[in-house]
Amino acid sequence: MKEKLLADEKHKNIGTLKSSGNALKQKISDLSAKQKALLAEPKQVEDALSQAQQYESQLPKTIKHLEQERNTHGRKALQLKKKLKPIEGSANEDVKEIEAADQIRLRAISAIQALLSM
């Protein structure tokens, strides 16, 4: 009887080990994929670092170029400003003249309508 119990126990252990094989294969597959991802990460970091360093090295040149463009446009704006002549009168005076012209236009329309309805 004792031998039978030991044989059953060994059979049970064999079954357990066989069934754990699939889980172990999945774990190995998962760890292998994780390893590949981790091995690829330094390359990605190195590439990103290289791009950032290249961008940083170009900053002074880019800034200098933009400053030159700004100065050129600033000088042109200053030249144009010097050429501007002040307009005499005020905006209020312009509005009054526009309103007066509009009143004349409205009276002319009324007069034409009155003549046409006769």
Image (cartoon, rainbow, N blue to C red):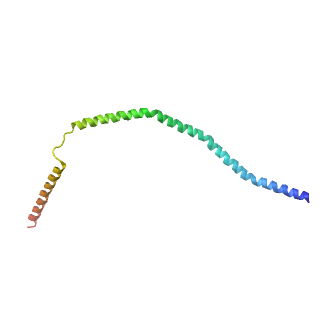
Instruction: From the top left corner, tell me how far across and down residue 86 is, in percent.
Output: 19, 41
Q: Nearer the viewer, residue 25 or 60?
A: 60
Q: Nearer the viewer, residue 19 or 117?
A: 19
Instruction: From the top left corner, tell me how far across and down residue 61 is, in percent.
Output: 42, 32
Q: What residue is drawn where x is 15% and y is 55%?
A: 99
Depicted 88 relative to depicted 11: above or below: above
Depicted 93 relative to depicted 107: above or below: above
Q: How many marks?
A: 0
Say left or right for 67 vs 37: left
Q: Considering the image in quadrants, where does the N terminus appear?
A: bottom right
Q: Considering the image in quadrants, where does the C terminus appear?
A: bottom left
Instruction: From the top left corner, tell me how far across and down residue 77 is, in percent.
Output: 28, 37
Q: What residue is drawn where x is 26% and y is 36%?
A: 78
Question: To which quarter of the image does residue 8 belong?
Answer: bottom right
Q: What residue is drawn where x is 69% and y is 49%?
A: 27
Q: What residue is drawn where x is 67% and y is 46%?
A: 31
Say left or right for 63 vs 22: left
Q: Nearer the viewer, residue 115 or 14?
A: 14
Say left or right for 111 vs 34: left
Say left or right for 43 vs 71: right
Instruction: From the top left corner, tell me how far across and down residue 6 is, in percent.
Output: 87, 56
